[in-house]
Amino acid sequence: MEREPTESDEGPARSSPDDFQSASTTPLSAIPLILANIVPLLGVMFWHWSLFSIMLIYWLENAIIGFYNIPKMLMIGGVLAVPMVLFFVIHYGIFMIVHLAFIFAIFGGLMSSPHRVQHFSIPVAFDGTTILAFISLFVSHGISFFSNFVGKEEYECSTIPKQMITPYGRIVIMHVTLILGGFFAMALGAPPLALAVMVLLKIGADLFSHVRERSIPGADAE
């Protein structure tokens, strides 16, 4: 009786391009993410950014993440997603307001000296370099949105409720790192080196979340 050929007879199976893509541990969208996060690092080292300015930049990044989550939910559910989108906007907006109050209270000096808060207003904390950081972060998350969520059709593997809560997981990881780093910097008097370490910790936490989300089947966050 003729023996049917086995896998060992035919040699190892050929790897397809999809196999290499699924085996990749670092998506290409991580590159603009790192580049965008380098801008705050340059701000600390060369443009004399304060701890408060850095915290405001990362607060605005939360707004960027929430902004891109809206078209994600709409791509998943279409018109049916509109009520959940409205709920997300209200809930996320409250979260943003509370977070901003926390930044002012802890890192803006409001808690220790209420009359000093005027010196930590948002317009004062922003100039051309901080606006550049905001634009770079906005573009970075946009690249991730179009290359991963749209280009790789991540929306096919998600649901509206799942996508609605996705931004919170990443923000919690990122900002626990920032808060710990911020307290460390404050304890040292917020020297540039301590602020740089805090920014590097944030980059590491952000990159970890980004790569982890890409490696989990059905992951659909930025």
Image (cartoon, rainbow, N blue to C red):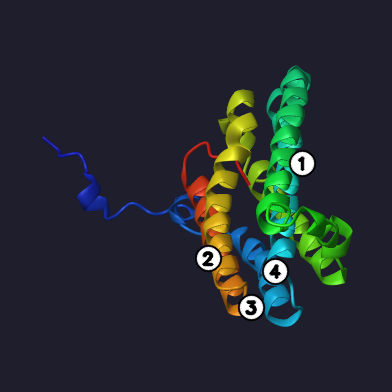
Residue 184: mark: 2
Q: Earlier in the sequence, mark 1 or mark 2?
A: 1
Disc 2 packing (10 Å; few <14; some 14–19; many ≥20): some
Q: Are marks 2 and 4 in contact (CB under 8 Å)?
A: no
Disc 4 packing (10 Å; few <14; some 14–19; many ≥20): many
Label 1 vs label 2: CA separation? 30 Å
Residue holding disc 1:
67
Label 2 vs label 4: CA separation? 17 Å
Disc 1 packing (10 Å; few <14; some 14–19; many ≥20): some
Query: Judging from the image, what secondary structure is the residue with disc 2 in?
Result: helix
Name the residue nearer the viewer: 211 or 108.
108
Residue holding disc 3:
192
Closer to viewer: mark 3 or mark 1: 3
Q: Can you say which quadrant of the picture contains the N terminus?
A: top left
Label 3 vs label 1: CA separation? 31 Å
Identify the residue shown where x is 73% and y is 82%.
46
